[in-house]
Image: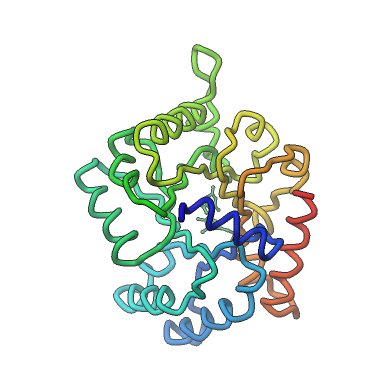
Amino acid sequence: MRYTERLQQRIERTGSRLCVGMDPRPGGDGVEAVPDFLKRLVDETWEYAAAFKPNIAYFEAMGLRGIEILGELMGAMPKEVPVILDAKRSDIGETQKYYAQGYFEHWKVDAVTLNPFLGYDSIEPFLSWEGKGVYLLAVTSNPGSADFQQQILADGRSVFELVTALGARSVAESNATDVGYVVGLTHAAEVLAKMPDAPLLVPGLGAQGGDLAALAAAKRTAPDVINVSRGIAYAGDERSFAQRAAEWAEKIAAAYA
Ligand SMILES: O=C(O)c1cc(=O)[nH]c(=O)n1[C@@H]1O[C@H](COP(=O)(O)O)[C@@H](O)[C@H]1O
C-alpha cells in the first residue's frame, strides 16, 4: 500500500489529522526517564494520532543512548500509526542513499522530512521506495523562512514554488515514494493557495502560536497532518497527554470539516 493511502485510511479511521510530535527533553530525572516518558506519550495519544513524528535531533542530543531509545521507540510503535521521522536531511545524492537506507530499511519509518536545498539529485535516492513518503520543506514555521523560502523570483514565483516544482518532477520521474510538503502554520495563509493537492505536514500549532483559520479557509482534501509537539508533551498544565491530544485532534478536525 502507498504511504498516502495508509495515511488517508488512518485519518478516516480515527477522524483525526493530529500528528503527535515526539521531541523528548530530559529533565531533572535524566535520560533514563525518557523511555517511560515516551511510552506514556505513545500509550496515551495513539488513538488520537494520525501519525507520530519523532525529531531525530532530540535523540541525537542524548548521545548513543538516545539512538538506542529511538530504536526502542520505533520497535514499540503501534502498527496502525504511520511514523514520520523528522530528520530534515540534505546532502549529495551518494550520501543521501545511505540516509534513505538507514531511515527506510533500518529504522523502518514510513516517511521522512527532507531539506530540498541541494536539488533534485539529493532527493532522488529517497524516491524509489514503495510504500514510503517524503516531506520536502517548502515554507517552514520559523521567521527565517523569509530569508530564502518566501523570496519572490524574477518570474513572480516564490522560491517555495521551486520546491513544489521539484516535487512534481519527483512524482513524474519516479512515482514510487509519495511526495508531500512541510508548510508552517505560522505562514499558511499566504502559502496554502499555491500548494498542490499533495499531503502536507503542518507544524506550528500550539507553542509556536499558529492559527488553524488559514487551513479551514483553504478547504484542503489531501491527507494533511498537523503536528503538535510541545502542546501535548510539555504543555505544563494539569491535563494528561490523552486529554491534550484529544483536544488538539478535535480542533484540527473542526478546521477540516
Ligand atoms: O518538520 C517539522 O516538523 C518542522 C518544520 C517547521 O517548519 N517547524 C517546526 O517546528 N518543525 C518541527 O516541529 C516541532 C516543533 O513543534 P512544537 O513543539 O509543537 O512547536 C519540532 O520537531 C520542529 O523541528
The answer to whether 175 is drawn above or below residue 23 in the figure is above
Query: Where residue 206 sits in the image (x, y, percent)?
Result: 69, 58
Corner quadrant of residue 14: bottom right
Front-most of residues 72 and 128: 128
Q: Residue furthest left?
A: 94
| 123 relative to 85 in the view: left or right | left
Corner quadrant of residue 227: bottom right
| 88 relative to 233 in the view: left or right | left
Query: Where residue 71 sits in the image (x, y, percent)?
Result: 36, 75
Taking the spot 60% from the left edge, 45% from the top edge, the residue there is: 184
Query: Where residue 109 sits in the image (x, y, percent)?
Result: 40, 63
Front-most of residues 223 and 189: 223
Front-most of residues 57 and 44: 44
Q: Residue furthest top?
A: 155
Ligand 1, by image quadrant, is: bottom right
Taking the spot 44% from the left edge, 67% from the top edge, the residue there is: 58
The answer to whether 59 is drawn above or below residue 37 in the figure is above
